[in-house]
Image (cartoon, helix red, strand yellow):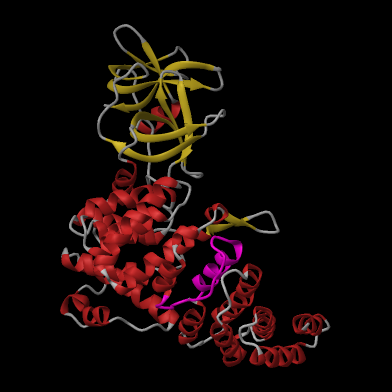
Amino acid sequence: MAFKDVMSLRKSGNNQEAYEKAIEDYRQAPDDVWAKRALAWCIYDGLKVHASCSDSDLFVTKLTELKELDVPASEDMLWNNVAWPINAFVRDCSKTQNVNKEIYDIVFEGIRDFHFVKPSKEYSVILNAFLNAKEWEGIIAFCDWWNFENFRAEDYESELLPNGKRMPLSLVESAYIAYAKELINKGDNEAIVAFVPRLQELAERYPKMQYPNYYVGKLLLASGSDKQEAVAALLPFARKKQSEYWVWQLLAEAFEEDDEKCMACLLRAAHCNTPEQYLAKVYQLLAIAFKQLHYYADARFYLDKYFQVKSGTLATISKTAFNMFHETWYAEAAGQNPTYELDYMAITNELIFNDKPEIDAVVSFVNTEKKMVTVVYGNKKEGFFKYDRFIKKLNLGDNLKIRLQEVSADGFMKVLSARVSEASADTDYCKTVKGSVSSNMSMTTYFLQSEKESFFIPSSIVSKMKLIIGEPVSAIILYSYLKKKDEWKWSCVKVKR
């Protein structure tokens, strides 16, 4: 039987002889299913051999040959196997520098009538391969053809690597992101509006996926839709990625009609722990914003930072930055120091955590070297946290508003936001009292003596303020934990004359 002869030649490694035999048999009997099947497997061998970008012409020739052979959909085993050399070829092209993007269009056109098994591991592999085709404008058409209804359950989970770690994104999330990115690039508002509900549904069904809400926000902003809706989509993502500059850059765009919030977001972006080469766009936006607010020294400061980054990366200077450099205000601001002040941390934390309740807390101890603060935040409730992420300077007795995530057994507090409050606390653990300064007989310990009680004044406060016995003062007293005495006790944390 001719089919067996061809298969025998293939197994023995005589692929070219097998192919020539299969071609001869097929030409003699083109309606013979076995002859067509044998030739299809020989073409598959050719696809495997030429599955590299350097063999593009030969690979495409074999692909076209298989397409014209019109193998029936019932050949599941063949179609599953064909997926792998297609995957290998597309991936190799994606790793090749300066590859002609038309090759992806050609391969897509070649396979779009193939009868891949759906859903299947092999069909998902093909999608994954084309998602790696960077800057290919055909990804939307490809995804529409592939059809997101064909995802397997496994595609919603990120891949487990041999070292036990997982890939950051699942195939599903990667596909939706690629689709959203290309919609933004094309600026097709009608398609964007149609895709947003699909992305929102994905975010709702799979809350562990980090990026769907982010791209919902980006799509809404790109389409010119309601900014509030975009912000609502972005905020949950911003909470998770608040250390990333590009999150704040995007939120600044969402708040472009609110000068203070927009500026706060840009400043937070600029102060993220990010290599400066990524911040050029943020610096330019800040320069533009400060110029519009007539803070020219600040505008020059950030424009200079923009030029420094561009100089370091040899990247092209934007026309906007070039024009600002030659404007009168830039020269006049030379040598001037920035003067704009904004508590951008408090504003941006308020933006992303405004649905979390704030609680009152009072500072009982500050370690300025380690930037750690101990606070009392309730009756016999005391904890500590690192404050420099939220506040530059703290003093004993300062009233704080904090958003608390959790407190560990040793008192370490995971704080979402913290800000100094002007409102004075008047609670069962913090009060304001009036009296006069007194001391013990040896004048080694000082107290604030009120009408009914006396309260300990730390020696640091006494020496700093040079308090005098009998001097009338008022003080904030705090019911805090004294480690040396292993007890909770009222003591003064801030004294005023």
Q: Nearer the viewer, residue 433 or 457?
A: 433
Residue at 21%, 76% in the rendered image: 330
Q: Determine whether 343 is above or below 399 in the image.
A: below
Query: Residue 475 in the image: x percent, y percent?
Result: 31, 23
Q: Determine whether 289 is above or below 7 in the image.
A: above
Residue at 32%, 82% in the rendered image: 317
Q: Determine whether 350 is above or below 234 in the image.
A: above
- Magenta stretch contains residue 238: no
Query: Residue 291 in the image: x percent, y percent?
Result: 19, 68
Q: Residue furthest top?
A: 452
Query: Residue 401 in the image: x percent, y percent?
Result: 33, 34
Query: Residue 28 in the image: x percent, y percent?
Result: 66, 92
- Magenta stretch contains residue 121: yes
Q: Which of 187 and 289 is in front in this view?
A: 187
Residue 373 lies in quadrant: top left
Left or right of residue 256: residue 184: right
**Residue 337 visible to the viewer:** no
Say which quadrant the C terminus sits in. top left
**Residue 19 visible to the viewer:** yes
Task: Report the span colored magenta.
Answer: 113-138
Residue 308 lies in quadrant: bottom left
